[in-house]
Image (cartoon, grey):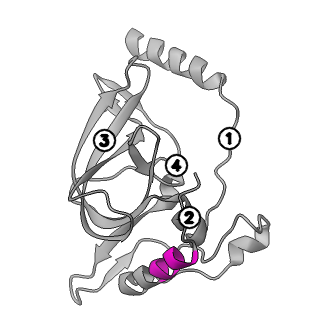
Amino acid sequence: MKRTVAVLVLWLGWAAGLPATSLLPMGLDDLTAASHAIVHGRIAASRTEWNQDRSLIFTVYTVVPTGYLKGRLGPSFELREPGGERDGLRMSIPSVPVFQVGQEVLVFVWTDCRGRHQVTGFEQGTLGVQTDPATGQKTVDRYLRLGSLKATASPSSLAAPASSRWLPQLLDQIRTSVVKTQGPATQ
């Protein structure tokens, strides 16, 4: 218990020195432009690890792609997301996606200068995929706003048209967004 409190106090002290941040809404074009890769795949494994100075816990997910819509990261790759449980300690960060082994996902991936991959835009950059057992139809768990929400950061931008939840149609919408936003990742 003392160790948990000590780590929590250290982490809060570290976090207090950070500037406040807001999670800006991202539309499909924003996510596409900011991502180095867009992947439809499955979570094959997960593990947790400390950062180098043991001040933060990360969960590392192994993703096996079934298809790429933008970029290529190989036959499998790892996503490294802050948070997780390690050595009896749990670290949770709002809006950071959490995956389950075996889960089918559609993921927008950003790669840092060290070659580490993470989800673009926190939970905005991931959609769970479900398969209807009766029909075999695949859908995603939520809509994405079409276009860019950066250009119009007003409440009305949240009323922008929404993407399809039917996976084949959403994949076509993403392909269109990739063509529209061609160029280097900008995050």
| Mark 1 or 4, closer to the camera | 1
* N-terminal-most mark, 1 or 4: 1
Q: Which structural element holds mark 1?
A: loop
* N-terminal-most mark, 4 or 3: 3
Tag 3: amino acid? Val
The picture places residue 150, in percent across and down from the top left corner, at 71, 63
Q: Which structural element holds mark 3?
A: strand
Residue 33 image label: 2
Is the stretch drawn in magenta largely helix, strand or loop? helix
In the image, residue 135 above or below residue 171: below
| Separation of residues labelled 2 and 1 (CA atoms) | 21 Å
* N-terminal-most mark, 3 or 1: 1
The residue to which callout 1 is attached is 21
Left or right, 106 with respect to 24, comes to: left
The picture places residue 72, in percent across and down from the top left corner, at 33, 62
In the image, residue 93 above or below residue 30: above
* N-terminal-most mark, 3 or 2: 2
The residue to which callout 3 is attached is 60
The residue to which callout 4 is attached is 95
| Residue bounds of the magenta highlight | 173-180
Q: Which structural element holds mark 2?
A: helix
Instruction: Pick out the residue farthest to the front.
Output: 183
* N-terminal-most mark, 2 or 1: 1
Residue depicted at x 75% and y 67%: 151
Q: Nearer the viewer, residue 81 or 101?
A: 81
